[in-house]
Image (spheres, rainbow, N blue to C red):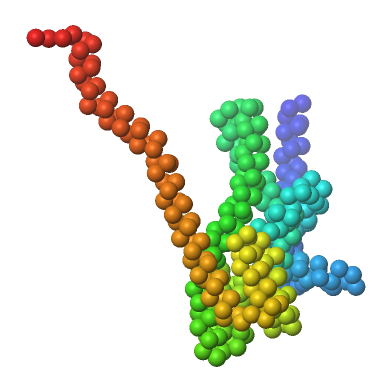
Amino acid sequence: METTITLLIATDIPGLLITASGVMGLAVAVFIYWLYQVLHTEDLPQDREWRYDVTRINELRRIDIFYRVFQPLIQLLAAFNRAAFREALPEIHREIQAAGLPRFWLAEEYLARAELFALALSPLYGYFFFNALGMAGLLAAAGMTILTAYFLRRRLAARARWRLLMIKRRMPFLLDLLTLLMEAGASFLNALTQGVKEFHGHPVAEEFGRVLTDMNLGKTRYEAFSAMRDRLSDDEITSIIGAILQGEELGTPLAHIFRTQADLLRLKRTQRAETVAGEAGVNMLLPGVLIMVATVLIIIGPFLMNYLQFGLTM
């Protein structure tokens, strides 16, 4: 019986090889077709409705290869995020704007991108934790996947805070330059164009460059600066832009407003430095006490050990 089965298998080996080769070739063909569809530069067709959304998706497909490859999955997770994290989406959208990311990102899609990246790492987590902990490692892998998505979310917030800090550090110098140019006779648009060129590559130039672009596209100064205020949503920057908008309404010369706001920013920066310096002494109190105790123990420790072991000697 076993000899008969062996002969049958030996007889069917060429057929099995041909079938396996066909399946492998089909799999490779499907993979190549999928890769071509993903990397093809052709845009999505424009429908009569939702034209802006199609344009936004096309731009994201151009600038983000991860979005292009996993667009269906990202949009599926985005629909889940709209229902599950509705209250957190406005804050994520504000952080996307403040971090200087492309304006084509929706909050739920960017969150889905982070979640999908975490899910892509989950098999790696499962492999290592399962080998180390057994079945309990699967729970640890699930926890690490959630933590990865959380850390990517916090990374966006940290990036937004850092960019806002860079803007506030350099803004007084840009306002001083605008003041000098306008007092020298330049118009606001010319002064702003020159200021953006001088600070090219810095976040403050990117934000004022968007203000300049909005004005060149037909928006008023009020509308352009209001868009910048809403885009950054920082209390300190909001107060500065609010003063500029108020001066625009009252007819106050912009050069005077820029000089006043630059001096105010420097004053606030000095106050922040004094606050940090004042807090440094309090923060160093506990480490200083621990170092002092450790030093005392190092000095008197040998004598104390000697006394406990041998007692007082003549």
Relative to 279, is 141 on the left or the right? right
Please count the marks in the image: 0
| Image quarter hosting the C terminus | top left
Asked whether residue 268 is in view, the answer is yes
- Which quarter of the picture shows residue 4? top right
Residue extending furthest bottom? 185
Front-most of residues 299 and 267: 267
Relative to 102, is 292 on the left or the right? left
Front-most of residues 42 and 61: 61
Residue extending furthest right? 48
Residue 304 placement (x, y as % from top left): 23, 17
| Image quarter hosting the N terminus | top right
Relative to 282, is 3 on the left or the right? right
Residue 85 placement (x, y as % from top left): 76, 47
73 over 169 or under it: above or below: above
Asked whether residue 60 is in view, the answer is no
Front-most of residues 206 and 79: 206
Q: Residue at x 58, y 76 (%)?
A: 257
Residue 5 placement (x, y as % from top left): 76, 32
Q: Residue at x 20, y 12 (%)?
A: 307
Front-most of residues 256 and 208: 256
Q: Residue at x 52, y 66 (%)?
A: 265
Relative to 272, is 76 on the left or the right? right
59 over 140 or under it: above or below: below
Q: Residue at x 55, y 91 (%)?
A: 185
Residue 222 placement (x, y as % from top left): 71, 76
